[in-house]
Structures are given as structure tokens and as C-alpha cells.
Image: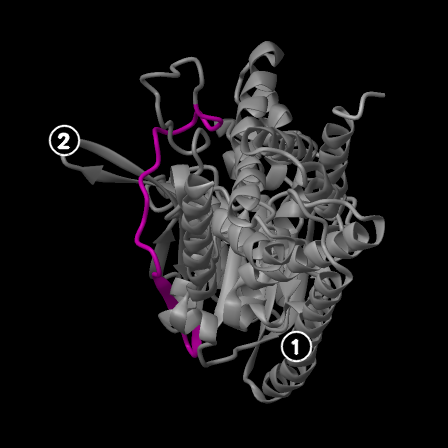
């Protein structure tokens, strides 16, 4: 095997191992050394070669992480396989550019081995932050989210957001690389790291992990004490398990409503004080289709507790109509107490961007026109409960749950229809990200999913109950209503922004140094 091929093999290994850190494989410890082979691969590379090595790692990672997009496109988007695979690959190619950019920029901004310890976490975090915003944003499976089950470690997300966990993992990868490079005399550029540099890197990683872990242990004690004292509410989530091929058939609309009402009677028997149905659980225009609406309202009144129900909505708009992906808060007397419209819409799922240039790609949901976005940060309230609602895809965006917590939400709710994903790893990946939203805001979270995974997350990030996939059921938990605002809620993505600025400064430094050479 030619030596010039070995770096590409190492880069590919980085990508595959990184995927292994995420559900459904879920070997989260892999994240702590998955990037080290990529660092070795680019250690002697020029900027162009470093980009392509990083791109290789990114492509291997995102193809194996997001393979399920082809299934969604071909099964529900109506695309033939000959087009659905290229569309999936196109997204992965775009995503791979972020890791390609990381590799090239790291070689530029860290000419000396010791600088890797600062430059790599800054650049990776900055690019994750960019990925959250660029082209409407797609922060699916940020590196830090892989650690969602390590409760003590992730508590610092209430200060730094998930980005702090990502930076810590990258730092540890750098420390491993520097130690191996020093022992095996592997060069970074024109010089190999000294044992002193490797020791400094190892010490920095150990100290930072100890700080995160120590803070987390103390914070868990505080939060759990607050949870004990806080007022609580018994919340039920209803999983109807309505198959996607029948969900939007008008002849099944009445049966679907009756099914959810029947399951909700079980919630009442379990002592529920609040019942949540999934995204578009009602496959008709609630409050407009009067006969079906009356059946639902009557059932809610019989249950005698507030309900949060999902339904598409349509409103007059200028000379036409505007469609919304909406949830309604219905009180026990049948009164509408408010609604929330989805803010961050799914490209090609709820609206079609670039339709003029890619007319062959339609929406995955063909039952309504393009959705319009709602108002960010809007909360719903009843009694002493203030709800921050996230619909489906919105839960992967930390800024949305933060805005709701900042506006006073003391309970987070996410509703979704993950039937699109089938039995792939996507529902597990999607659910894993909700834990970080609870940790960042220190708010309990209830999740209702049509086909699963439904469940509950406590303010400390502990997942206390989850459902299976493609089963129906009702799940009830007593959730604490915590008040107060975390550092992250108050100040947002300050950590990611700070590291982005640091990364930019290092890039400028690297460009100047390169110009003088």
C-alpha cells in the first residue's frame, strides 16, 4: 500500500469511528479519540491536501450518520432511487466541507504543534456554530451531543451550551495525538511535538475534564435539590402509532382522532394533569373542519385536563392563504388557550427552497402548501405552567429552547412525527439531542412522537422513560417546574462566539505568517 494512501485511510477511519459515537451504535467513548487519526493524516499535509483529507473524514462520517435521508426521500418524497441517493449524497458533501475546512484551517492556523491545543477546539466549535446558521442551519448531531448520557460531564452546557462539550472532546483528541506524535516522533509540519508539549497537552485535557466533571457533580446536586422542592405536574404523552401511508388519508381522519381520544382516557386513569399529542396528530384543519373538531373538543372536555394537540392550520393571508404547522392548547372546558406555530421549518419538508433551480425536488408532505413560520420564543400558559414548545426539527436548535426559557417557560415540550425515519437510527439520534436542551435550560422536557420515540427528560438531562418504535401507548411522568435562568439562557452562545473569534484571529495569524514565508 502506498504511503500517500495511508492518510486517506486514517481520515476515513476518523469519520467511521466518529459515527460510532452516536446512536444507534452509541459507543460515545469513541468521540474522545475519533479525530486523532485525522490529525495524524493532515500532520504533514499542505492546505489543499489537508482539506481533502478532512473532506474524506467528513464524507465517511456524514454518509454513515445520515444514510436514512435516502429512505425518507424515496419513500415519502416520491423521488426515485436514482435521484434520492444523489440528494442524500449532496447534503453529505456539503456537510463534509465543514470537516474539510477544519482540517485545512488547522494546518494554516497552527504551524507549531503546541498551537493545536488552542486552534483545533476553536476552529471545530466555530464551524459547528456556523453549521447551526448557514443555509438555514443543520446542527444535527453536534459532537458534544454524543455525550448525552454522561450527566456530570454535560452539566456545563448550562453555561457554554453544547459547544463547550464539543470543544472539550476536540481538546482531548489533540492531547492524544500530541502524546502519540511525541512518542513516535511524528512531525506536525516541519517539527515533531516534544514530550514537554505532549505533557502540557495531556495536563490541559485532564484539568479541563476535571473542571467539567467537578462542576457537573456539584451542579447535579444543586439541580436535584431544586427538583425535589419544585412544584410538579403529571404529564402524559400519547403515542398513536399512525402509519405514515394512512396518516393523511381523509377517510382515516376520524378514526385517528378517535384513537387518540381513546388512548387519552388511559392518561386520565394514570392521573395525568396535562396530555400531549404529537405533531399533526390531527390530520385535518382543527377548528375549521367542524364535525371532526367537535369530536375532539368533546373528548377533551370529558378528560377534564388541558391538552396540547398538533394539527396543520390555515389562515387568510393577503390575497391567499398561509399554512402553519401548529399546536393548540385546549383547556378542560374546551376553550382555546393559545397556539404555537413552528418557527424553523424543514427545507423540502415544509417548504421548498431554491424551487426555481431544483424543480424536480418537491416537498415530502404534499397535503398542504408551503408552511409559513411562526414567532420565535412564544410560550403558552395554563395555571402555573408556562410551556416552551418545539416542533420536530426545532429541538436540534439550542437557540429556540433558549428563547422560550428566557421568556419564562418552566416546562419544555417537543412534539414530532418521526414515522418518516422508519426503523433507522434517525429516531434515536433525534431523541438523543433533546437531553442537551434540558441541560442547557435546566427545564424538564416531555416528548410526544407519533411512532416514537416518546419520553421524558429531567432538568438534569436524565432520561427517565422512553417508548419503543412503532408501538402505541400512553406514558406518564411527574415533572418538576423549575424557575430561573441559566447562564446559557441569559447569554446564549457566547462561548461558541468567543471561540469563533479566536479561531478567526488564528486564521489571520496563519495567513500573515504564510505571507512572510
Q: Which residue is mark 1?
A: 211
- Residue 53's x, y, as percent? 64, 31
Give x and y (percent) for residue 201. 70, 64
Q: Quadrant of residue 174?
A: bottom right
Verify whether residue 124 appears in magenta: no
Instruction: Count neighbours of disc 2 (C-alpha within 10 A) and say few if under 14, some if 14 to 19, many if 20 or more.
Output: few
Query: Mark 1 or 2 closer to N-term?
Result: 1
Q: Quadrant of residue 104?
A: top right
Please report the residue visible at 74 percent of the width from the left and 48 percent of the height from the top. Answer: 21
Question: Quick one: quadrant of the N terminus?
Answer: top right
User: Going by the image, does 321 lie left or right of 441?
Assistant: left
- To which residue does mark 2 refer? 319
The span picked out in magenta is 363-386
- Quadrant in the rendering for residue 88: top right
Q: Is residue 191 above or below residue 420?
A: below
Magenta residue check for 377: yes
Q: Secondary structure at mark 1?
A: helix
Q: Residue at x 41, y 65 (%)?
A: 492
Q: Is residue 20 left or right of residue 340?
A: right
Q: Position of residue 126 (x, y in %)?
A: 48, 52
- The prevailing secondary structure element of the residues shown in magenta is loop
Q: Nearer the viewer, mark 1 or mark 2?
A: 1
Relative to 267, does residue 83 appear above or below in the rendering?
above
Vertical placement of residue 199 versus 245, above or below:
below
Q: Residue at x 38, y 31 (%)?
A: 351
Amino acid at each position: 500500500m502506498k504511503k500517500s494512501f495511508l492518510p486517506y485511510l486514517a481520515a476515513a477511519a476518523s469519520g467511521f469511528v466518529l459515527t460510532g459515537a452516536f446512536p444507534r451504535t452509541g459507543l460515545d467513548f469513541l468521540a474522545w479519540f475519533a479525530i486523532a487519526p485525522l490529525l495524524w493524516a493532515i500532520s504533514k499535509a499542505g492546505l489543499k491536501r489537508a482539506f481533502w483529507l478532512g473532506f474524506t473524514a467528513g464524507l465517511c462520517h456524514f454518509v454513515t450518520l445520515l444514510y436514512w435521508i435516502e429512505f425518507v426521500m424515496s419513500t415519502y418524497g416520491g423521488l426515485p432511487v436514482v435521484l434520492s441517493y444523489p440528494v442524500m449524497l449532496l447534503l453529505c458533501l456539503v456537510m463534509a466541507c465543514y470537516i474539510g475546512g477544519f482540517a485545512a484551517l488547522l494546518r494554516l492556523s497552527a504551524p507549531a504543534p503546541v498551537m493545536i491545543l488552542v486552534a483545533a477546539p476553536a476552529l471545530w466549535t466555530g464551524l459547528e456554530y456556523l453549521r447551526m446558521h448557514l443555509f438555514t442551519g443543520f446542527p444535527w448531531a453536534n459532537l458534544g451531543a454524543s455525550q448525552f448520557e454522561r450527566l456530570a460531564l454535560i452539566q456545563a452546557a448550562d453555561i457554554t451550551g453544547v459547544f463547550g462539550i464539543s470543544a472539550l472532546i476536540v481538546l482531548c483528541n489533540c492531547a492524544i495525538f500530541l502524546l502519540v506524535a511525541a512518542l513516535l516522533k511524528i512531525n506536525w509540519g516541519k517539527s515533531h511535538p516534544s514530550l514537554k508539549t505532549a505533557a502540557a497537552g495531556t495536563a490541559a485535557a485532564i484539568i479541563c475534564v476535571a473542571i467539567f466533571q467537578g462542576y457537573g457533580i456539584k451542579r447535579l446536586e444543586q439541580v436535584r435539590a431544586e427538583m425535589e422542592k419544585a412544584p410538579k405536574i403529571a404529564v402524559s404523552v400519547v403515542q398513536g402509532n399512525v402509519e405514515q401511508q394512512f396518516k393523511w388519508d381523509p377517510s382515516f381522519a376520524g378514526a385517528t382522532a378517535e384513537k387518540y381520544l381513546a388512548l387519552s382516557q388511559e392518561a386520565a386513569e394514570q392521573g395525568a394533569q396535562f396530555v400531549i399529542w404529537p405533531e399533526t396528530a390531527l390530520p385535518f384543519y382543527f377548528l375549521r373542519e367542524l364535525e371532526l373538531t367537535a369530536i375532539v373538543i368533546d373528548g377533551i372536555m370529558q378528560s377534564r385536563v388541558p391538552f396540547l394537540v398538533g394539527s396543520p392550520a390555515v389562515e387568510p393571508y393577503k390575497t391567499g392563504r398561509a399554512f402553519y404547522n401548529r399546536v393548540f392548547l385546549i383547556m378542560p372546558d374546551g376553550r382555546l388557550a393559545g397556539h404555537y406555530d413552528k418557527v424553523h421549518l424543514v427545507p423540502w419538508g415544509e417548504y421548498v427552497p431554491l424551487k426555481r433551480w431544483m424543480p424536480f425536488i418537491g416537498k415530502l408532505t404534499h397535503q398542504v402548501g408551503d408552511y409559513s413560520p411562526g414567532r420565535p420564543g412564544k410560550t403558552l400558559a395554563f395555571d402555573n405552567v408556562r410551556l416552551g414548545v418545539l416542533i420536530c426539527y426545532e429541538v436540534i436548535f439550542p437557540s429556540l429552547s433558549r428563547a422560550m426559557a428566557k421568556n419564562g417557560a418552566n416546562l419544555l415540550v417537543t412534539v414530532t412525527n418521526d414515522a418518516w425515519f422508519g426503523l433507522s437510527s434517525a429516531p434515536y439520534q433525534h431523541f438523543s439531542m433533546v437531553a442537551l436542551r434540558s441541560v442547557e435550560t435546566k427545564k424538564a422536557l416531555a416528548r410526544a412522537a407519533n411512532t416514537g420515540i416518546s419520553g421524558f427528560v429531567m432538568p438534569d438531562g436524565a432520561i427517565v422513560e422512553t417508548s419503543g418504535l412503532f408501538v402505541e401507548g400512553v406514558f406518564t411522568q411527574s415533572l418538576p417546574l423549575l424557575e430561573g435562568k441559566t447562564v446559557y439562557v441569559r447569554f446564549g452562545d457566547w462561548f461558541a462566539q468567543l471561540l469563533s473569534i479566536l479561531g478567526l484571529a488564528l486564521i489571520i495569524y496563519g495567513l500573515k505568517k504564510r505571507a512572510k514565508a
